[in-house]
Image: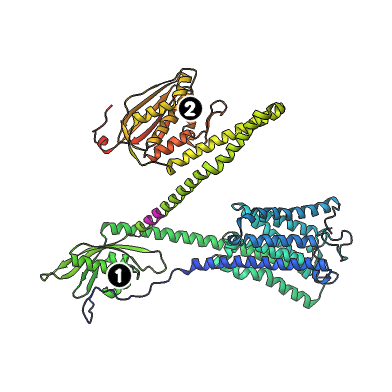
């Protein structure tokens, strides 16, 4: 395999082929989702204009604006108002990025108003009552509803209830969005039936039973606004299936409009053309046909989507298996290459062809080798190779190679130049390995570190909020409660004094919990640099702080010489303080005796705090280290339930672990490990 250059060999990297474009499928799916979101907003805007037009017709007394066909059912003012509010909500929900946050709480209020409007109207029909809301805005100047002028159809009331509830569920997010989508589809179906009924003059479709007839405008507007709600979350549900890049999405996008609109239109035209009968039979046939076709389309689309997902997973597993196999082969031998610099002859081992995604046996030379390198890295490769040859050093370079339609593929090449008698490099020998997995791990680590930094920043901000914004009002509440007790207690009845006492106690307890939570947050945000900390000194400091409870309980602490560890002195004092403090707090009828011990455990120090207290059920040995977890009533054993959580966080920050060994009624033994220093691991330094 040889290749001759007309003007000799050179290490200059010539411009290669252009980089293959990325897979357009994800961009296409995102583009479809944006299109559906814009469609949802457009439908909301259209409905907003139409409902405003209807309301204007009522207020201006223009009958042709409130009903399309003379003597037909008119759309009522309350229906138009409810639909208008739903359109406003949909516009706001689909444009949250540009909406001030202060507007958000009002959304559920408006949605609740729409639901209430529908419920009140429905209750009037059910109870045969008249609350005077039907003509509250304007008197009904049409004659279609002589019995109850201005009252909307029971079907319209149901649609308002369902769509208002749908918006509330949509606003809550999570699993509630599925409920919102189902309710929207139900309203779409009701509106669709109403439009079909009016087109085919089938009264039973828009006036079921003895109910009031729903106008064709109401049916159409409900159908449009329900469609907008269904498309408001284009990355989930039916809307997501519509934007799917697979065959299911294509099938839905192409057939669903035909089934929903083209088929009824054709049937209506046929009915009009034949002018036979009242159209009821034809309407039912069309509805049945549409329902069957929609079910068939949805069923087929779901099956096709499942097949596509299974195929993609299988292909992904195959690709993963192949990558792992290739990595094992490469780790065993790697891809070897030999480049004759003077004659520009290149030899590749079979593994190299696989690594570089080149057909086995393809003649390789400088130009087509360079063409396989990502254009962004070609200058780096050329510069590194030149420097290695000039310095008589090992050539080592990481770079990307082209992988059209696939993920980024990283290579690492290592080699060394062979020099002739003249001192000029004649050959370059080396190997190449695929380091794509390593790069992905590095990327994951960087992303994880970024997330950790953000979380730490959030925790720090929370600590600041807790220290200022939360504690200040709590102190104010407590102070005013105490002031009321001191000045006006004699004027209050016993129940009032009891309530005031509850307020003061609750404020004090909440302030204590906030302080404890702040203390937990400061484990990382206010940590001190690690230094050598004599654990004897840390324990003595903790015992000084526990002097009062030791005296009150007649407790004693037995200890032994303790080593020094590398850590945060303040936090280690806190560990001793919490563990020994708990031993004194959860004491039995015996005088509390606490024993502190230490021993070597491999490369760690094992510290233990043993007491003769009430003990802990072994079932709760993990639970007690969680934040705010308590096994006893705070009235019996006061505290916040965060002390052991702080201990675990501090010990883990120091590279150790903590656990408890206990049986109920037999005392407890809390143990934690801390790493030894280098000299102690080798057997030098501290000895007990």
Highlighted magenta segment, given as a residue range: 441-446
Residue bearing the label numbered 1? 379
Quadrant into which the C terminus falls: top left
Pick the residue in front: 587 or 35.
Answer: 587
Tell me if residue 295 comes above or below residue 520 in the rendering: below
Crowding at label 2, few (<14), some or many (≥20) Cα neighbours within 10 Å? many
Which dot, 2 or 1, sits closer to the camera?
1
> Which secondary structure is most common in the magenta stretch?
helix
Q: Residue 659, position in %: x, y?
A: 42, 33
Which image quarter: residue 427?
bottom left
Q: Residue at x 62, y 52 (%)?
A: 172
In the shown orientation, is residue 183 left or right of residue 568? right
Q: Would residue 47 be found to the left or right of residue 172 on screen?
A: right
User: In percent of the image, x 40 and y 72: which residue is there?
Assistant: 20
Residue tagged 2: 616
Residue nearest the observer in this picture, 183 or 610: 610
User: Which mark, residue 387?
Assistant: none
Sequence-wise first label, 2 or 1: 1
Say left or right for 645 vs 374: right
> Is 551 part of what is drawn in magenta?
no
> Residue shown at 63%/59% (left/top)?
93
């Amino acid at each position: 395999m040889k290749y001759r250059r007309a003007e000799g060999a050179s290490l200059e990297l010539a411009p290669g082929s252009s980089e293959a474009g990325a897979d357009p499928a994800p961009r296409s799916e995102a583009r479809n989702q944006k299109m559906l979101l814009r469609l949802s907003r457009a439908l909301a805007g259209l409905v907003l204009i139409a409902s405003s037009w209807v309301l204007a017709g009522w207020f201006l007394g223009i009958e042709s604006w409130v009903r399309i066909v003379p003597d037909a059912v008119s759309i009522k003012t309350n229906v138009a108002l409810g639909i208008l509010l739903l359109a406003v909500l949909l516009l706001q929900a689909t444009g949250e990025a540009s909406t001030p946050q202060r507007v958000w709480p009002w959304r559920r209020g408006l949605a609740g108003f729409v639901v209430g409007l529908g419920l009140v109207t429905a209750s009037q029909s059910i109870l045969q009552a008249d609350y005077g809301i039907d003509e509250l805005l304007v008197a009904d100047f049409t004659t279609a509803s002589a019995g109850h002028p201005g009252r909307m159809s029971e079907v319209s009331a149901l649609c308002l209830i369902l769509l208002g509830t749908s918006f509330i569920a949509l606003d809550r997010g999570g699993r509630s969005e599925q409920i919102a989508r189902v309710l929207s589809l139900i309203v779409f179906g009701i509106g669709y039936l109403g439009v079909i009924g009016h087109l085919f003059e089938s009264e039973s479709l828009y006036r079921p039973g003895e109910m009031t007839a729903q106008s064709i405008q109401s049916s159409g507007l409900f159908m449009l606004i329900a469609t907008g709600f269904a498309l408001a979350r284009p990355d989930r549900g039916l809307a997501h299936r519509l934007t799917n890049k697979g065959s299911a999405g294509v099938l839905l996008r192409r057939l669903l409009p035909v089934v929903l609109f083209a088929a009824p239109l054709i049937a209506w035209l046929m009915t009009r053309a034949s002018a036979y009968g009242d159209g009821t039979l034809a309407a039912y046939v069309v509805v049945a046909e549409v329902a069957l076709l929609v079910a068939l389309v949805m069923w087929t689309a779901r099956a096709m989507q499942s097949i596509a997902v299974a195929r993609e997973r299988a292909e992904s597993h195959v690709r993963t298996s192949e990558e792992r196999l290739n990595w094992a082969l490469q780790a065993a031998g790697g891809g070897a290459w030999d480049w004759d610099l003077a004659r520009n002859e290149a030899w590749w081992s079979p593994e190299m062809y696989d690594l570089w995604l080149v057909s086995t046996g393809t003649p390789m030379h400088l130009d087509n080798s360079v063409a396989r390198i990502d254009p962004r890295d070609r200058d780096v490769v050329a510069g590194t190779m030149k420097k290695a040859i000039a310095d008589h050093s090992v050539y080592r370079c990481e770079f990307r190679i082209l992988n059209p339609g696939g993920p980024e593929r990283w290579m690492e090449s290592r080699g060394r130049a062979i020099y002739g008698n003249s001192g000029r490099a004649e050959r370059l020998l080396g190997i190449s390995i695929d380091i794509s997995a390593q790069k992905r791990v590095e990327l994951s680590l960087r992303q994880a570190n970024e997330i950790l930094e953000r979380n730490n920043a959030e925790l720090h901000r929370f600590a600041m909020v807790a220290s200022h914004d939360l504690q200040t009002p709590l102190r104010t509440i407590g102070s005013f409660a105490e002031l009321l007790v001191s000045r006006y207690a004699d004027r209050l009845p016993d129940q009032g004094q009891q309530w005031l006492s509850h307020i003061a106690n609750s404020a004090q307890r909440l302030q204590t919990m906030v302080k404890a939570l702040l203390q937990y947050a400061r484990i990382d945000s206010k940590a001190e640099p690690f230094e050598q900390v004599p654990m004897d000194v840390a324990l003595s400091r903790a015992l000084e702080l526990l002097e009062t409870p030791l005296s009150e309980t007649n407790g004693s602490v037995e200890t032994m010489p303790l080593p020094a560890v590398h850590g945060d002195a303040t936090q280690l004092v806190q560990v001793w303080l919490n563990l020994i403090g708990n031993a004194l707090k959860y004491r039995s009828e015996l005088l509390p005796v606490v024993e502190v011990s230490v021993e070597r455990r491999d490369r760690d120090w094992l510290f233990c705090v043993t007491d003769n207290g009430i003990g802990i059920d072994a079932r709760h040995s993990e639970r007690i280290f969680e934040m705010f977890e308590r096994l006893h009533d705070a009235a019996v054993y006061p505290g916040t339930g965060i002390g052991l959580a702080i201990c675990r966080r501090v010990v883990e920050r120091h590279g150790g672990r903590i656990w408890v060994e206990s049986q109920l009624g037999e005392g407890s033994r809390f143990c934690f490990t801390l790493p030894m220093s280098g000299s102690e691991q080798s057997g030098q330094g501290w000895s007990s």
